[in-house]
Amino acid sequence: MNKTPSATRPLAVITGASNGIGYQLALQLAQHGYDLVATGRSDKIFQAAEDFRRHGVDVVPVQADLSNYEEVERFWKESTALGRPIAVAVINAGIGIGGAPFWDTDLDEEMNLIEVNVTSVVHIAKRVVTHMQANQSGRILFTSSISATQPTPYETVYGPSRAFVFSFAESLREELKTEGVSVTALLPGATDSDFHARAGMGNTDIGRMKKNDRVLVAKQGFEAMMKGRDHVVGGDWATKRAGFFNRFLTETYKAARQGKAAKP
């Protein structure tokens, strides 16, 4: 348990911290002595905060719907209300929609996905980057996906949203490399969370396949961020191999392969 006084502990903010990879990333931060401002969409964030506090750190839980502009602003106000520099920002929150062709999916759900996976990422990043650039210090981790490296039929809006995050992180990294701020992207493969079930993909090959350990994926992301790496593919050796070969395979081949795995 970390017993360093809160006045001298570094502060981290994290979105999507109530479950899955985000929960494990928040645990990594707590275990390494970071106080947290952590947000989640459901009231699970309050129980998660109790788990994080067991590691001897202070936690401010914020239940917020990041698809709403004012809720993002409220989260940021909670983050800065402590009057402390933010050492780490983990911009992790994201949702998925899949398991059906584009013409059968719900437009409102897809617009909501864009609000969470793209719009809120830019919104939060604007606040974080402005804060860290002024301090000339900080680390940012964006959770993208290995889906960012390939077309994603039957997840036709989700994949491009993750490709945006990856490209956005790479662009910010270049801009900030002389400003004392590092930017890292985490690209997890299929992971043992409830993500695919919630995305409507439980009856697909992807939904049924063996998943990567979320603890391992979070550890890899945390370590890559602390080393200042550009990006890391999160998961086992097979996942990393797939991420590597996606650089060289044609988009039509990857689209057909992914379509077979994701088609219900």
Image (cartoon, rainbow, N blue to C red):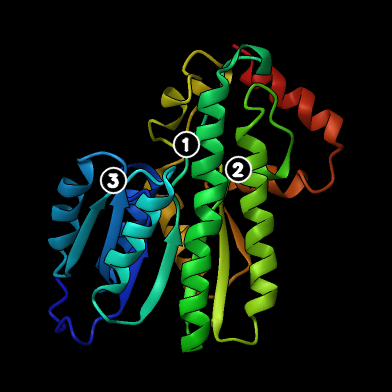
Q: Position of residue 149 (x, y in %)?
A: 71, 44
Q: Residues within 10 Å of mark 1 (few under 14, many from 20)?
A: some
Identified at 87% across, 37% down, the residue is 250
* Sequence-first tag of 2 and 1: 1
Q: Nearer the viewer, residue 155 or 224?
A: 155
- Identity of the residue drawn at 14% across and 84% down: 5
Numbered tag placed on residue 171 in the rendering? none
- Around disc 3, counting alpha carbons within 10 Å, would you say few (fewer than 14), some (14 to 19), or many (20 or more)? many
Residue type highlighted by circle 1: Ile
Q: Is residue 236 above or below residue 108?
A: below
Quadrant in which residue 57 is drawn: bottom left
Quadrant showing the C terminus: top right
Disc 3 marks a residue whose amino acid type is Ser
Q: Disc 2 or 3, which lies upstream in sequence?
A: 3
Quick check: 104 left or right of 39? Answer: right
The answer to whether marks 3 and 1 mark residues whose Cβ atoms lie closer than 8 Å is no
- Give percent across and percent down for residue 37: 27, 63
Helix or strand or loop: what does disc 3 sit on? loop
The residue tagged with tag 1: helix, strand or loop? loop
- The kind of residue tagged 2 is Thr
Q: Pointer 2: residues within 10 angstroms few (<14), some, or many (20+)?
A: some
Q: Is residue 203 left or right of residue 104?
A: left
Question: Within the image, what quadrant is residue 60 found in?
Answer: bottom left
Disc 1 target residue: 95
Q: Does any portion of residue 198 appear in the rendered image?
A: yes
Q: Which residue is mark 3?
A: 18
SS at badge 2: helix
N-terminal of the two: label 3 or label 1? 3
Instruction: Provide residue 111's location: percent of width, then percent of height.
Output: 56, 32
Residues at discs 2 and 1 in contact (Cβ within 8 Å): no
